[in-house]
Amino acid sequence: GGAAAKKKGTSVPAFLAQAQLMEAERTGMPASLEPLPDVVPADDEEDEGPKLVLPDSTPVAPAPAPAPAPLLGDDDEPPPFPMMDDGPRNPDGTRAAGAGPADGAGAEPDDSNVPEGAAAFDFGSTELYLKEEALAARGVPREGALVLTSYLKDMEWEYFGWLSGKRFVDLTQGCMGVAGVMAYKFGAEGVITDAAGELPLIQEHVALNVGGDTVQIGETPEQAMQRVRTAAMALGGPLPAEVEEFKAAGPIDLIFLGDTILTPADRKASLASIQALAGPETLVLAAYPDRGGNEGEFKEQLEAAGFGVKFVFEDPARGMYLFEAQLAQ
C-alpha cells in the first residue's frame, strides 16, 4: 500500500485519506490525492510521503437559528414569492389532465384523494379543494385573493409553523374564502367574512379541506372544523356577533384583504373595518391589482390612521401588489 497521509497541523480529514488508501489497495493503483477539495500540499520537512493541509482550519460556526418571519420594520428582504406557474390549467384554474407536477410538489398528487364534487386548486406545493360546481360557474377567485393565498403558503413553507395557532379575520370578500381556508389548513383559527349568501359555499370549502395536515397534532377532525367559522359582514359596517366574540377571546394576529380596495368607497370601508379589528400586534396583509393608483391612496390613508406600511411584493408589469401594515409603535 501507499504511505498514509499523516496528520500534522491542519491535515486532510483522516477518513478521506483512509478511503483513498483502501481504494488504492483494492485496485493496485497508487493513491491519488487529487479529488480532495480545497487541499494544498505542505512543504516537506522530511521524506515521509505526501502530507496535505487544509487552507483554513477555522472552526465552522454552528448554523444560525431560522430567522423569524419578516414583520413590519425588518430590513431583510421578504422570502422569495414565486407566482403560480405550474403547467397547463383548465379554464377553472384546476390542473389540466396530463400536466406535469406542480413546482415544489415533486410528484403529481393522487387525484383519488380529491373529495367528491371538488376540484384540486393548486398553489404550487399545496392544494386547496374547492367546489367544482362553483369554479365552473364563477371561474377562479379574484387575482388579489390568489396572490395573498399563495403568499400565505410561501410564508408557511419558508417559516414552518408561522401560521399555526395564529388568529385571523379574513376580509377578502367575494373570493370563496380561499385565503382563510389556506390559513386554516396550516393550523390557524379565525373568522372568514362575506355576504350572507356566500357563507354556505365557504363552509363547504372548510369542510372539503379537513383532513391530512389540516388536522393538527392532538386534534380530531371535528375539533379542526371548530377552528374556523364564518360571519355575514359588510365592510365598514358593524362587526357581527361572531367577529365581536372572536375579538373578545384574544388578540387578532392577522387580517386579510384582497380585491376590496379598488374604489374610494371600498377603501374607506376597508379602513374602517381594519381600525375596528386591529391591535398593536396585528399584521394586515393586503393583495390587489393596481387600478389607477389605488395602492398609493390606500397606503396614505393607512399611514394617516397611524399604520406603518411595507410593500412585500410588487409586480408592476402585472399590476399586482401585496403589502403588510401594522400600527406604529
Image: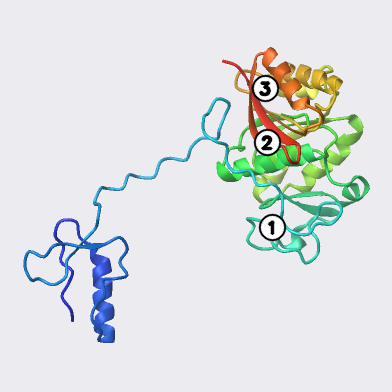
> Which kind of residue does numbered mark 3 sit on?
Ala
Label 2 or label 1, whichever lies nearer to me, is: 2
Q: Is residue 26 toward the left or the right of residue 190 in the image?
A: left
The relative height of residue 101 versus residue 127 in the rendered view (above or below) is below
For label 1, the SS is loop
Quarter location, residue 245: top right
**Residue 247: x %, y % from top left:** 70, 21
Instruction: Specify few, some or many for label 1: CA neighbours under 10 Å numbering under 14, 14-19, or 20 or more.
Output: many
State the residue position of label 1: 102
Let me know if residue 181 appears in the view. no
Let me know if residue 106 appears in the view. yes
State the residue position of label 2: 314
Label 3 or label 1, whichever lies nearer to me, is: 1
Contact between marks 2 and 3 (CB within 8 A): the answer is: no
**Residue 162: x %, y % from top left:** 58, 38
For label 3, the SS is loop
